[in-house]
Image (cartoon, rainbow, N blue to C red):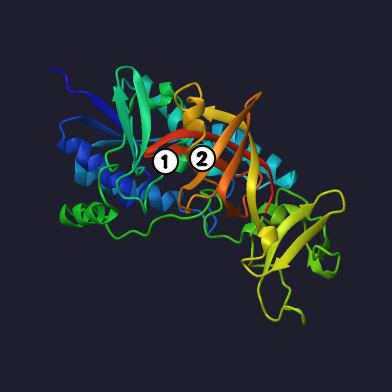
Amino acid sequence: MRRQKVIVGMSGGVDSSVAAWLLKQQGYEVVGLFMKNWEDDDTEEYCTSRVDLVDAAAVADIVGIELEAVNFAAEYRERVFAHFLRDYAAGRTPNPDVLCNSEIKFRAFLEHARGLGADFIATGHYARVRRDGERVALLKAIDATKDQSYFLHRLTQAQLAPVLFPLGEMPKRDVRAIARREGIPTWAKKDSTGICFIGERPFRDFLARYLPRVPGAIETPDGQVVGGHSGLAYYTLGQRQGLGIGGTRDRGDLPWFVAGKDLARNVLIVVQGHEHPLLYRSELRADALHWIAGAPPSPAVLAALGAKTRYRMPDAACAVTLEGDGTCGATFAAPQWAPTPGQYLVLYDGEACLGGGVIAAAAGC
């Protein structure tokens, strides 16, 4: 009897390493696939792709599977990075990791895996799928501190149908324990953070290579000039670090936060204090709506959803109103801190991730 074939996306990290080991133990025919998605400056100190490929190869040897390397850099530049630059140039703050999943890891990778005769694909993401006949639901991971359903909310039924998430039912500590016990060389490797193609490099320096610096004033909401910025594209709502301004007499040494951007005047608006009311919004509008099921849920479900406007935040109670043309309004039971245009409104019904949209604007304290 033929064993089912699983192509595992292997990044050289501990999560995908253990995912491959688990699938091998479960009796699948497992093949590892290392994706190279960025090559503009892969010889610089900030790019780890060569080290990661060496690590992935070492893991494949221990697990006893073949490893193939494939270059998706052209697809990444066209489908993800071009969007990233357009959004920043327009004053928004995109999340390229979401597009990387929907366009590269679960599209280009999936197409390549099918060409290799795969029955399934798998990754080290912390999420779960639930199959009900031909319908597939995306669920949060058991380990709430590592759940990555937020980054997967734009996947379709066709993309989710062949997916396995071996780590979805496991806490992260067990993943590292398995890796250490089995002699998997990545067991103590630090988790990657931040945007994949930027790595640990200074973000502003990286962005300046692609977008021009357009300096302007930093002002308070009442028009007081308190400093200067090097370009609105280099700042995001809620940002605290890198503003280069100190306290004021009336508010002491409370830290400054970015509260808005006046694109017409090229002015960055800042306020003092994390709890300043201009940092909070109770309503927002999102466009480019995507529903994992292929269609929105019932009005009763839309009226009582949980939502995230940032990855690390807990679900916030909200009601969603569909407005047509892939646009919706969301009203929160409690004001949310610094929802940011270009980021995502991700919607949940309990443990099920339903989909989401791109935040276009926010209002109301």
Task: State the residue position of label 1.
Answer: 149
Asked if marks 2 and 1 touch (Cβ < 8 Å), the reply is yes
Name the mark on residue 346.
2
Disc 2, SS: strand
Amino acid residing under circle 2: Val
User: Which image quadrant is residue 284 in?
Assistant: top right
Instruction: Tell me the crowding category of disc 2: few under 14, some 14 to 19, or many 20 or more residues within 10 angstroms, Cα based.
Output: many
Residue displayed at 33% across by 32% down: 129
Decide if residue 356 is in sight here: yes
Name the mark on residue 287.
none
Amino acid residing under circle 1: Ser
Q: Nearer the viewer, residue 115 or 313?
A: 313
Where is residue 203 shown, x and y percent of the image?
Answer: 62, 58
Decide if residue 102 is in sight here: no
Where is residue 351 shown, x and y percent of the image?
Answer: 36, 39
Quadrant the N terminus occupies = top left
Q: Mark 2 and mark 1: span between their CA atoms?
A: 9 Å
Instruction: Tell me the crowding category of disc 1: few under 14, some 14 to 19, or many 20 or more residues within 10 angstroms, Cα based.
Output: many
The answer to whether 357 is drawn above or below residue 148 in the figure is above
Where is residue 354 shown, x and y percent of the image?
Answer: 45, 32
User: Which image quadrant is residue 289 in?
Assistant: top right
Quadrant the C terminus occupies = bottom right
Where is residue 216 shown, x and y percent of the image?
Answer: 84, 60
Q: Nearer the viewer, residue 101 or 271?
A: 271
The answer to whether 217 is drawn above or below residue 43 in the figure is below
Q: What is the residue that sits farthest to the left in this orientation?
A: 1
The answer to whether 187 is drawn above or below residue 122 in the figure is below
Q: Name the N-terminal-most of marks 2 and 1.
A: 1
Q: Nearer the viewer, residue 181 or 149?
A: 149
Disc 1, SS: helix
Q: Nearer the viewer, mark 2 or mark 1?
A: 2
